[in-house]
Every structure is written in structure tokens, then in C-alpha cells.
Image: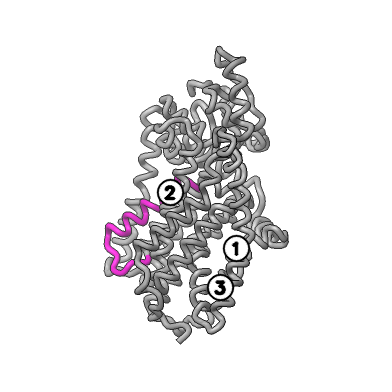
Amino acid sequence: MLFSNDFNGGEGKISRRTCFFILAVITLVVRFPFFFPENDLDESTFILLGHEILKGHLPSVTLWDLKPPLLYGFYAVLQLMGKSIPVVRLAGSFCVLGGAWFVCIMGEKVRNLRTGLTAGLLLIVYATLTGDGATTSSEIVSLLPVSIAMFILLGEERGKLDFFLTGLLISIACMFRLNLAYVALFGCVFLVAAPKLVNSTLSPGARLASYACGGALPVILSILPYWVAGKLGLLYQTCIRAALAYSNSQKSPVAILVEDLLRFGQWHYLLLHSLMLVSFLGGLTLILAGWKNFEQRSRKNLATLILFMIATGISILKSGVAYEQYLIQLLPFCAVIAAFFLDLIMQRRAAPLLVLICAAWLIVPAGRVIAAYRPVIARVRAHRSLCYGPGYRIAAYPRKNNPDNRPVFMMEEAIVYWLDGGLPSSRISAPSLQYRQRLFAENYRWTRGHSRSGA
């Protein structure tokens, strides 16, 4: 039957180990040319605040930004290997590969391993080519904990440790992307109100308690250094008050939804994402139309995926802005549903023709990757450094002309601060904040008067 869950074609020819190898190779091929250019303000900000941690400062004390401190801790760890943008991008690639692998296993639980492999490949391609996904953005970093958490929820018999780890991982993702707090809250409701979807013999109270304990751990670890330093007020102003004020001062959820949908009216965006869009809509249609024909286990897994996808979508709409890269957070769910559709249609008699159509759909994404390889190949042939961009060239100037390392102000290319060891001219001149004057003018005059020491 078309909607049966016992299809095993091809599974005897491919193992999980082979799937992981394929995903690893494709991740490297797709993301490698993006290791070397410096081109993202948010990533530069995260690197700079991570560097402040290595210098012994708490995040937002010497240089201010409104993300949770755990995110900057991630970038601080990466800098233990030196000042290297390729290392930062490599870490992002590991996050994408890890997310793709757990999405692959989710696809196997929903249908079969071939579905999972297809889902993993879709995630790699579209996580890289959506918005700033080629850099190590907070959306890319959050892919891994979210994917692992969903993998755990789709398991068979879940115990206290499973719910503890689920809460822990979703909370870590919240510490990378604050909007995912809505998903964390939804998880509480899900564990209590949807017992038929939660594969566990534990009581709702025990499930919720385990989940809450896991979720509290990253929050406590983030708060503790500020409590010891007597700066809990700064953490509250930064991660709660500033974040909420910024979100509330931006667009409404309806306006964000409209803006996201209007992107598909742009021909270049539509061509780039057409395979994912058509496959996702087709998969969602087939799932809803054939719901009664699925096995009970598949229905539970699909329902869980769809519910958490909706919760993630709501969290994006509540963020206040409609940046393209925010949609990366939906990919673990959308990729599985799209792969479900692709696996079903490949069983039809016209499968060879459909394969050609899918390959044609990938021409535009492949073109983007090939274009990124051209400057890398040109630099290899010219025996020049693979790292390129204005920031690298500008960094050489202050090294020669600012021996006293006096504070400078960069309108753009703020990665120069990191490359040459200089400092921004003030603690609120982080590159991702330079154009948020309304945030400071209306809500955060308290930032004035804070010295670099945080006094």
C-alpha cells in the first residue's frame, strides 16, 4: 500500500554507517568553500563576546549584546584553537552534520532509512544556503540540540533520563536562540497533555519534573557566574528586558508571516527553495490525506514532529523580525516531511523521471555552491591565503598605525576588532547592534554609565 510503513526497498543495501559517511562527505563538499570569507555581523559579534570570556570578562560587561551568555561560551571554546574563522565555520559544519544525522534517524523512525538519508541531505543543503546559514550563526548552532531532543522524543519507551535529556537539550537550544523558549514551554504542555504521543509509562508529573530539571540546568549554569559577580541585574536587563523590548518593538507575528511568505514571490528565492517547498507541501498533504492508513507508531512520530514544528514556527513569528536565516530552525521538521514525500513518489513507475526532475531542482543550489568554490580555487592557483574579505585587509592597517591599541569604531567589518586585537569604541558598539538605535534610545539608557569594568 502507498501509505504502509513496511517498505524496506534499498534498506538492505545501505547501513547507518554508510549514511553517516554520505552525510559527512556532502556536508564537507557543500560547506567547505564558505569556511574562508568573513561576511556576517552576527557571527562577528558572537566571536567578539566569546573572546571577552577568554579575557576573563562576563558577556555583556565589557561588550554588550542581548543574547544568552551560553552562546558566547560556545564561541569562546572555539577560540581556544586560535583566531581562525575557518575553525569557527568548521564547528558550524559539525553542528549541521550532527543535526543531519539525527534527522536521518528521525526519518528512519517515521518511515525508513532511505527517507532519513534524504531528510539529512535536504537539511545540509538548505541549512547552508538559507540566509546566513553558511556561517556559524546561532540558528546553525541550535540545530544540533534541537535535532537530538526530537530524536529522543521519537523513541520507543521513554524514561526519566530521556525526559531529563530532552529538557536539557531544548534549554541549551534556548540559550543559543531565545525565541525557542516558546518551544521549551510547549514541551511542558506536550508531556502533560499528550500522553498518547509520549511513549512512557511514567506519570505526567514525573515526566514534567524530569524535563524541568534538565531544562533548569543550563539556566542555572548561565546565572551562576553573574550571581557570584553580583551582576544578576545586568543579566536580567540583557537577556529578558532587552530581548523582550526588542521583540515587542518590531513587527507583529502576522506581518512576519506575510513577509516570510512573500519571499517565495521572488523568483531567485523560489528557484533556490523550490525542491524543499514542493516536497514539504506534498509530504504534508499525503500525511494528512492518508493519516488513517499509517501504523500507530508512525502516526505518533509524525504528530510529534508536526506539533513541535508548529511550536517552532510560532516562536519564530514571536521573535519580532523576519530574517531569512530564522527559518533554518524549521528545517529538522520540514526536511523529514519533505523526504517522506520524496520517498513515496520514488516508488511510482515514473521514478526515473522524478529523479531527473529533483536533480533539475538542485541546479540552482548547486550553482550557489560552485560559485563559492571559484574564489577558493583561484586563490589556491595563485598560492595565496584561502581566507579573504575586506576584514582581513583592513585588519592590517590598525596593526601598523595603532600601536597603542586605542579603541576604534568600525561601521562594518567588525571582525577587525578580533583579527588585530583592538577594542570597540564603546561597550554598546557590538557590530550586530549598530543599527538598533531605537532599542537604546527608548529602553536602555541604563547602558550609559557602565564602564568597561562593568562598574
Quadrant of residue 277 in the image? bottom right
Answer yes or no: do the residues labelled 2 and 1 have beta carbons within 8 Å? no
x, y (%) of residue 144?
A: 43, 52
Residue on which the image places disc 3: 355
From the viewer's perspective, is residue 334 above or below residue 132? below
Determine whether the residue tagged by mark 2 lies in a helix, strand or loop. helix
Highlighted magenta segment, given as a residue range: 154-178
Disc with the residue nearer the chain's start (2 vs 1): 2
Residues under labels 2 and 1: Cα distance? Answer: 23 Å
Judge by depth and name the residue closer to the eye, 176 or 204. 176
Q: Which mark is residue 276?
A: none
Q: Bin the neighbour count of mark 2 within 10 Å (Cα to Cα): few under 14, some 14-19, many 20 and up.
A: some
Which three-letter amino acid code belongs to the residue tagged 3? Val
Q: Which mark is residue 362?
A: 1
**Secondary structure, magenta segment, majority class:** helix
x, y (%) of residue 349?
A: 53, 84
From the viewer's perspective, is residue 316 above or below residue 233? below
